[in-house]
Amino acid sequence: MASASTSGSERNFSCSICLDVFSSPVTTPCGHNFCKTCITKCWDEQVELKCPLCNMAFNTRPDLRINTLLSELAAQFQTSIRVKDQLCVKPGEVPCDVCTGTQLKAVKSCLVCLISYCQTHLEPHQRVEILKKHRLVEPMDRLEDRMCKKHDRLLELFCQTDQEEYEVKMALLGRIEAEVQQMINERLNNIQEIKDTVNRSKADADREIAHGVHILTALKRCIEKCQDDLNQMVKEKLKSTEKQAEDLIKELEQEIEDLINRCSEVNQLSHTKDHLHFLQAFRSLKDPPPTRDWTTVEVRPPSYVGTLRRSLDQLEETLNMEMKKLRDAELKRVQLYEVDVTLDPDTAHPQLVLSEDGKQVHYGGVWKKLPENPKRFTKRIRVLTRQSFSGRFYFEVHVKDKTGWTVGVARVSINREDLIIATPETGYWTLFSFKNGLVFRDNPYVRLPLRAELQKVGVFVDYDEGLVSFYDVEARVHIYSATGCSFTEPLYPILCPCYCDFEGINSAPLIISPVKQTRTFVC
């Protein structure tokens, strides 16, 4: 289809319906030309036959015949367009320096004129005698750069030094090409790694959704069962009450019927005028039917007190079981990111004692003389690990038999020489335990339920998500999560065993312990 910027000559050979060059053009009685297919389709879709241009109406469908002259002219025009398109310069080709407007590709370059010519503009060099003497070569771009600035001649020869320079530059070019190719390969690998990450993320998302659907479906079934049991229990109580009431009503109705019959007999006897018959009939009068003492009989509405509570207790028990499974699965998932860490003696406070393997630390009580080190804590009895991290990682610390301790992570740039309060604002995300409680150190502190049985703490960090989570490993319980954290530096695991008194209370060490679990993903 022709563009909006169609030239005047092209519009003369274009169908006004399809806006393209005529194909089998026909002429209507009103003198307008259209592609035969276009006008035929147009009239097939119209109830009244009209010219699309002037709206002249036709009583009968005109007999359309191919306009031979116009068809030949349109074909020639179409051919000229194709030739022109073929001659137009394409990326990488040398353009004609003479063409104005649409540039055609050059077929020759003149080393005398220093100009490149298309076939049309080359014609004088093939016709004029003096121009025939000019040296023509295959199209060359930037001819002026090939001229010697000193001799005003085309560069033709080079010396031995130039040859050596050429070889050096070619070797350098080869190295550059190899380096560029290596950079390309590295970036291709980066693209593949990103794609792999996206695929893993999709797989994780699908797994998480499936896991969530499984748990929520189980909870939904549990709630529905609880509702059904409640409905059934209430209905059974109501049914029992209704059955009791129905039986009592039947008994009452029977007594009423017996009493009505006796009343009828008594009434009938009371109207007897014959005294002898009355006395004889009175003696034969039946004894009154036995009746219940209805003053002590009542239908009590059923009591539903505790019915809903018992159902909810059952639901709560089921929910607790499912939550335990969920917590266990969550802990197993984060344990997959376990890292092997060892304590760094260069960061340890002088009163701390580290084991040889770098896995344990306890308060020694003696200030050791150590070399000055900007990495060392001098005011707080803390120690960092040798390793830092900036992705997802998990580690566990044994805290059994201790009354006070601090475990968590800290950023690289924390102040190690002043009495800085450990909060996220100062670069610490830590859990602190003491005799009377358990807190996450924030501003203000986040007080948590005291877990007397706490023996091992798990710490999980998702750097990109800004998440730090703490777990009671033995109980498989989530303790606390700090969310929305802003991490801008690598993070170090940090331990503080706290002071111990003269009686040795809280002298037990903090121990970095390996994860003990089967490495299988639970969904």
Image (spheres, rainbow, N blue to C red):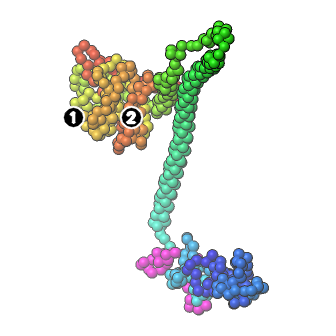
Q: Nearer the viewer, residue 278 or 488?
A: 278
Q: Which residues are magenta?
A: 127-156
Q: CA distance from mark 2 to mark 1?
A: 27 Å
* Residue linked to disc 1: 418
What residue is rendered at 42% in x and 38% in y?
A: 462
Q: Which corner quadrant of the image does residue 508 belong to?
A: top left
Disc ID at residue 291: none
Residue 262 is left or right of residue 366, and the answer is: right
Q: Nearer the viewer, residue 470 or 444?
A: 444
Residue 479 appears in the picture as rendered: yes
Question: Of helix, strand and loop, which one carries label 2?
Answer: strand
Q: Residue type at mark 2?
A: Ser
Q: Is residue 278 above or below residue 354?
A: above
Q: Tell me the residue at 63%/18% (across/down).
A: 271
Quick one: label 2, few (<14), some, or many (20+) residues within 10 Å? some
Q: Tell whether 194 sits left or right of 272.
A: left
